Amino acid sequence: MRILIADHDEAYADDLLRAMRKVGAIVDRVVTGSEVNTALMTCSGFDLLILDLNLPRMHGLEVLKRLRARGSRLHVLILSAANSVEERVKALDAGADDYMTKPYSLDELQSRVRTLWRRSLGGSSNQIRFGPMTYDLANRMVLIDDKRVDLTARELRVLEVLLLRANSLVTKDQLVDRLCRWGEEVSDNAVEVYIHRLRKKLSTLPSESSRFVDWDIA
C-alpha cells in the first residue's frame, strides 16, 4: 500500500509516518493543499490519502472536491482538529471515506487504514483469500493451505498490487509507482527479480489457482 499524507503539523506528521510504516506502507508527505493537489494529478500510484483539512494554500475540503471532480476513487481518510458534526458531514458528503478527529489513537488509525485497504482488495475481513492463499492484512502474513510463506517486505508489496488487480494486466510502471517513495528508484530488472522470486515462492499453489502465479505483466 502506498499512502500520501497531507499535514502541515510536524508532530502529527512524524507520528503518522511512523504509524503507517508499521503497517508496511510506502509513505510520502506533502505540507500544503496545492502540493497535495499537484501530487494527486501527477501520480496515480497512491492507494490512500490521509488528509488534514486545515492546510495552507488550499483547504483540504477543496483538495477533496477537486479529486472527486476528476473522477478519482482514491480512498481518503480525513484527520482534522475540526470535530463538529457540520464539518464531518461536509467532508463525507464531498467524498471522504472516513473521518477522524485530532487527537486520535494510532492503533485506531492503523485499524481504519487496514479497513480501507481491505475494501480495495475486495475483502470484508483482515484475511483476504485467493484460492488456497490467505493474506492476513493485520499481521502482513501470507498463508498457503495454512502454511506460512516467507516473503520480504518488497515481495509482499508486489503481491498486494497483484491482488488488487488479480484479473487485469499489470504494467511494470504500475508496480514501480507503488513500490517507491519519491526519490527512490526501482529498475525494470529489479521488478522482474521480485516477480520471479514471488512466483517461485508461490509455486506450491494448486493448478486451479495457477493463473495467479502466471500474472499478466507488461
Image: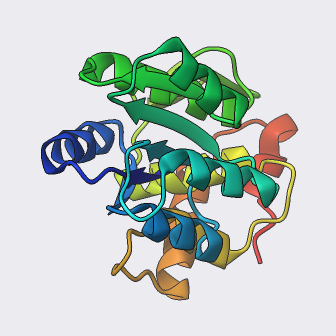
Q: Eyeballing the image, is 147 above or below 165?
A: above
Q: Residue furthest left?
A: 11
Q: Eyeballing the image, is 44 above or below 201?
A: below
The residue under the point 35% across, 36% down is 23
Residue 35 quadrant:
bottom left
Whether residue 145 is visible: no
The residue under the point 70% across, 46% down is 164
Q: Eyeballing the image, is 11 above or below 191?
A: above
Query: What is the x, y in percent for residue 218?
Result: 77, 78
The residue under the point 23% across, 47% down is 13
Query: What is the x, y in percent for residue 152?
Result: 36, 52
Whether residue 201 is visible: yes
Query: What is the x, y in percent for residue 69?
Result: 79, 55
Q: Is residue 11 left or right of residue 114?
A: left
Q: Is residue 57 left or right of residue 74?
A: left
Query: What is the x, y in percent for residue 146?
Result: 54, 18
Closer to the camera in the image, 173 or 88: 88
Closer to the camera in the image, 215 or 126: 126
| Colour approach in the figure | rainbow
Closer to the camera in the image, 173 or 141: 173
Q: What is the tally of numbered marks visible in this picture?
A: 0
The residue under the point 52% across, 25% down is 87
Closer to the camera in the image, 99 or 75: 99
Residue 89 quadrant:
top right
Q: Is residue 45 left or right of residue 106?
A: right
